[in-house]
Image (cartoon, rainbow, N blue to C red):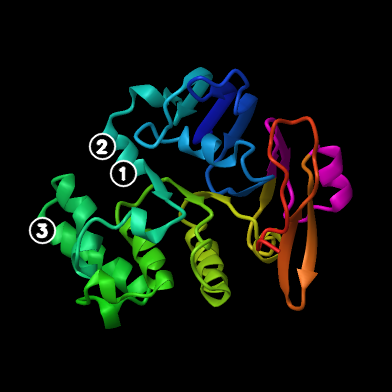
Amino acid sequence: MELFAIKHLNFAYPEQAKNAISDFSLSVRPGEFLVVCGPSGCGKSTLLRQLKTLLAPHGRRSGQILFDGKNLDELSQREQAEKIGFVQQSPENQIVTDKVWHELAFGLESLGYDTPTIRRRVAEMASFFGIQTWFYKSVTELSGGQKQLLNLASVMVLQPKVLILDEPTNFVDSSFGRELYAMLQRLNSRMAIVMITHDIGTVSSVVKSIVCVNRHVHRHDSNIITPEQLRNYNCPIQIISHGDIPHTVLGHHEGDGCPDHTHADGK
């Protein structure tokens, strides 16, 4: 059975005549690793935030989103918290406590898990992510990469069925990005993963499918995609390399309602 089944989804922000996303249909199956790419401002984050009602933006929505065969809106917040993990762009926006160990335990405490279960799961995640050496630190002492790793571990301690990440390497250095992708590849044996990233060149070695979004969705069931295919999908980005580090360049695209874009690193 599909984990997510998105059927003819439309969404428009308040007081906006034009849809941010139009007639999106997409499925996410167990064990998949999907990367979502496309020009900035053209529906990627809007789409992913629809997959968790607590994070969904306010606006006009039509269509259907099913999770495990049930209407997503009918799932309780507890079910969504446990089954649908979500890591946001900025590490600062997701941390809610002052200590590393408490951040790891917070979600389980909030859901009323017993102390032995909390201790066991926290210990497992601290070991898996290599957090033991800074387990008792204040979160203010952590680097950006450590904070994002803590966010990921805090989500994983709930043992979700699917993990959603919205550009998780935006505020960290490239070395952490490579470390994160390697960890996600290991986690993919346990759950489905859906991730937005501009770093298509690097992440293509670990993902299984690529979804191109430019107000519409085009699914490419391979981790290799060419500029010609991107043009065919009306997804105006190019993949180039600067030295050993792949980047994306957002091409000019008139008439789709998106702003003009420049190089993904701002140059």
Tell me where residue 86 appears, x and y as whole percent: 41, 48
Question: What stretch of residues is rendered in magenta?
Answer: 211-234
The front one of 47 and 124 is 47
Decide: is 76 above or below 132.
above
Image position, residue 36 (x, y; %): 63, 46
Pointer 1 or 3: first along the chain: 1
**Amino acid carrying mark 1 in the image:** Glu
Could you say which disc has been placed on residue 82 in the image?
A: 1
- Side (left or right) of 112 relative to 139: left
Residue that lies at the very extreme toward the right in this rendered image: 228
Work out how far the residue at label 2 is from the one at label 3, CA to CA, in angstroms.
18 Å
In the rendered image, which residue does mark 3 sit on?
115
Query: On residue 99, which mark appears?
Result: none
Label 2's element? Answer: helix
**Please, is residue 227 above or below residue 6 in the view?**
below
Q: Position of residue 187 (x, y in %)?
A: 47, 60
Give the class, few, some or many, for how many residues have Cα within 10 Å of label 1's Cα (few <14, many ≥20): some
**In the image, is residue 255 above or below residue 196?**
above
Task: State the residue position of label 2.
Answer: 78
Badge 2 or badge 3: first in the primary sequence: 2
Whether residue 1 appears in this view of the structure is no
- Quick check: is 24 in the magenta stretch? no
Q: Secondary structure at mark 1?
A: helix
The three-letter code of the residue at mark 2 reads Arg
Q: Quadrant of residue 146?
A: bottom left
Q: Quadrant of residue 259?
A: top right
Q: Secondary structure at mark 3?
A: helix
Q: Are marks 2 and 1 in contact (CB under 8 Å)?
A: yes
